[in-house]
Image: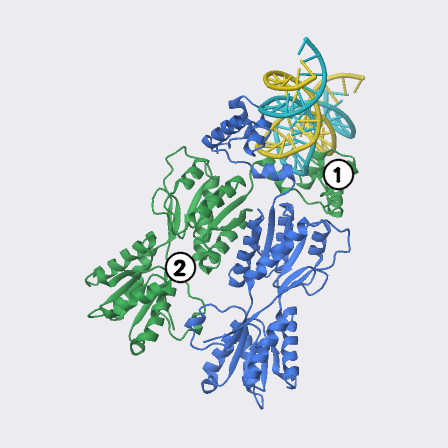
Chain colours: A green, B blue, C cyan, D yellow
DNA sequence: TCGACATAGGCAATCGTTTAAAATAAGTAA
DNA sequence: TTACTTATTTTAAACGATTGCCTATGTCGA
């Protein structure tokens, strides 16, 4: 492989010093215009490509932020990435992306990799199963700021940008109540995710507000498999007075629940309402779908998270005492069709 | 920000030279075991994080490959990334990802950025509108191998890994023919994409094989907007004998076409068959969908592309004369429900 | 006792770029 | 002519890690 052209090569050819060439290329005003022009011309002809590794090394700054998400296949995160990239780009920062695939071990490795690469900061949507936050504490200790987004850590004391899940759940539940439902089930997410409980709070607050009793039997936690949702629905529908509406932790769960009804109680399909959370691709092509869902603006969340991170990076370090940052992104209720 | 711990810090503390520390950490057998242990212990205690920028610089090798795709929101590419990452990981390579958002200008910038960062190779699904391949020629000239995937460049002479689009289209069309259809429309993709024509070839070959006449009026090109598909369908359905089945360039187009029928010709919905291309999320929740689609294994494509790239990177440069590599990933016909 | 040899570790150059400080050249005013 | 500016360019050190080669010390056999 041919070695690339370096500043030295250009300097030698033009009979000038390396520093002159370096300065000329970065448009340093102390270099005369004709010289700058000569240098740029040759650099162009010779197809000079600056060696970023060398620059990063010398400057001990990479202008790069690391972004860690569970899974790229989830468009929710893909959209958040776009938001973060936009903001980062506006500040001449690059973004490097890695997926944990929900594996905390892999996540640790990624953090390590990113620290070795000297990212200036980290944006993280942590994996579902993470319990031990020590990696991130260590990271913060090294002076690399970390902003969590989408998935807040269970422990607090960390900066985070998340949807206003409580209020979103409130709005979804309220919508169902206003539609006349009195018996509303909550198909809750995994107990290992704190968001499951945050949404439970919103659900309860809505019931409270409209003087409906809270009934623990109307809340069933599922993981994200279809089987789990089917099982939960089976138990729901066996109740003496089954719910007439469901608030689902996310739209995919709502779809599975609807699927269950399609198969087992097709007659009820038209009467039972669902409200879900999150995005729902192909919405317009679905014939049976939740009547409403809570849209999380993940693009905006990505933007906001990147903004907070960049602010933190450039902030004067207040030598401890900087308050923990929490930003909530409000959710929109979207009524379908 | 605290400066990170360096080899020098460790060396000073332990009263040894930097090189000893370096060698100890990389398990060099010329360093005695007790010394290695002492070094590792302190490195661990002090939370030493190697500076990759410095290593890359020194080694003039980054063990990183760049991956450029149009859009992360497209799960087709997200899956290809997973495949590529898997293979790269097996060879201790990292992958950096960037999106062109179908903008050739942005794509140029990304290539430049990646070259500056001295990636060892490039994996590219080029943007729809790219005409000028000079950036990639220049890249190849610098000795950085480029493998195209998913979207082959129109020009040839470039290494590429793509689905066997011709055969996929053949299989889809054949499926419709075997179902008894004699009048089959092809809702073709944008004329700017060479794949549109490759699939046309497969469509024609199937017609030929079953002695059906080819009729240019049964082929209409659309971009990916719903309006375009609606317009095409309108023209199709106005024909004296409209098609009784359609082969769609991709499933999303098929869904739009179905949507058109739902709205304008609901009576025909059951009689007209569709076959599409590519992935189709939420398949099981759709009540009206293509009867069959051609599954492209984008995961496998990502794997294969990464494999070819790594092979090319490590290959002895045969000083011109290396034949252009073309790998086709076969497609599966998937009958729905 | 001496040389040969193995073992463990140190020396020093190097990668490409940036940048503060010094050097040089070219005016300019006294 | 001299000293002082100002404009332009060079010098040289630094960033952190790697690695081929050299050195010091010890061991062993003859």
Q: Chain of mark 1?
A: A
- Residue position marked by numbered label 2 in the rendering: A296
Q: Position of residue B206 (x, y in %)?
A: 63, 80
Q: Is label 1 in contact with label 2 (beta carbons under 8 Å)?
A: no
Q: Position of residue B333 (x, y in %)?
A: 54, 73
Per the image, label 2 sits on a secondary structure element best described as: loop
- Residue position marked by numbered label 1 in the rendering: A9
Q: Is residue B214 left or right of residue B284?
A: right
Q: Chain of mark 2?
A: A
Measure the alpha-carbon separation of dots 1 and 2: 53 Å
Q: Residue shown at 64%/36% (left/top)?
A: B58
**Res. A63 in view:** yes
Q: Residue shown at 54%/61% (left/top)?
A: B299
Q: Quadrant of residue A238?
A: bottom left
A39 vs C13, nearest the viewer:
C13
Number of residues whose C-alpha sits closer than 10 Å to that of mark 2, classed few (under 14), some (14–19) or many (20 or more): many
Question: Which of the labelled discs sits on residue B273, or is there none?
Answer: none
Q: Quadrant of residue B228?
A: bottom right
Per the image, label 1 sits on a secondary structure element best described as: helix
The quadrant of the rendering that contains the C terminus of chain A is: bottom left
**Res. B100 in view:** no
Q: Is residue A183 left or right of residue A222?
A: left
Number of residues whose C-alpha sits closer than 10 Å to that of mark 1, classed few (under 14), some (14–19) or many (20 or more): some
Question: In the picture shown, does residue A1 fall above or below B187?
Answer: above
B29 vs A12, nearest the viewer:
B29
């Amino acid at each position: 492989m041919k070695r690339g052209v370096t500043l030295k090569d250009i300097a030698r050819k033009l009979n000038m010093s390396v520093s002159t060439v370096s300065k000329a290329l970065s448009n340093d005003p102390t270099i005369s215009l004709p010289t700058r022009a000569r240098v740029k011309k040759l650099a162009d002809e010779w197809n000079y490509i600056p060696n970023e590794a060398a620059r990063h090394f010398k400057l001990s700054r990479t202008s790069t932020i690391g972004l860690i998400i569970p899974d790229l296949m989830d468009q929710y995160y893909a959209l958040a990435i776009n938001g973060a990239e936009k903001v980062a780009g506006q500040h001449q920062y690059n973004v490097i992306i890695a997926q944990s695939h929900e594996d905390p071990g892999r996540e640790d490795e990624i953090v390590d990799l990113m620290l070795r690469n000297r990212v200036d900061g980290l944006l993280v949507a942590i994996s579902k199963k993470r319990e031990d936050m020590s990696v991130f504490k260590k990271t913060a200790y090294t002076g690399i700021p970390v902003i969590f987004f989408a998935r807040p850590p269970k422990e607090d004391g960390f900066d985070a940008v998340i949807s206003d899940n409580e209020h979103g759940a409130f709005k979804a539940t309220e919508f169902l109540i206003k539609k006349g439902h009195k018996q509303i089930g909550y198909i809750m997410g995994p107990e290992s995710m704190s968001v499951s409980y945050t949404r439970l709070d919103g659900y309860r607050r809505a019931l409270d507000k409209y003087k409906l009793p809270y009934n623990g039997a109307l809340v069933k936690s599922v993981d994200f498999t279809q089987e789990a949702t089917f099982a939960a629905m089976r138990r729901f529908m066996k109740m003496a007075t089954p719910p007439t509406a469901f608030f689902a932790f996310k739209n995919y769960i709502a779809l599975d629940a609807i699927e269950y009804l399609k198969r087992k109680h097709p007659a009820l399909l038209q009467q039972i309402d669902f409200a879900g959370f999150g995005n729902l691709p192909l919405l317009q092509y679905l014939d049976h779908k939740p009547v409403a869902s809570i849209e999380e603006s993940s693009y905006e969340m990505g933007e906001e998270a990147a903004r907070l991170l960049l602010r933190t990076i450039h902030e004067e370090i207040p030598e401890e005492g900087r308050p923990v940052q929490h930003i909530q992104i409000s959710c929109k209720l979207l009524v379908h069709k």
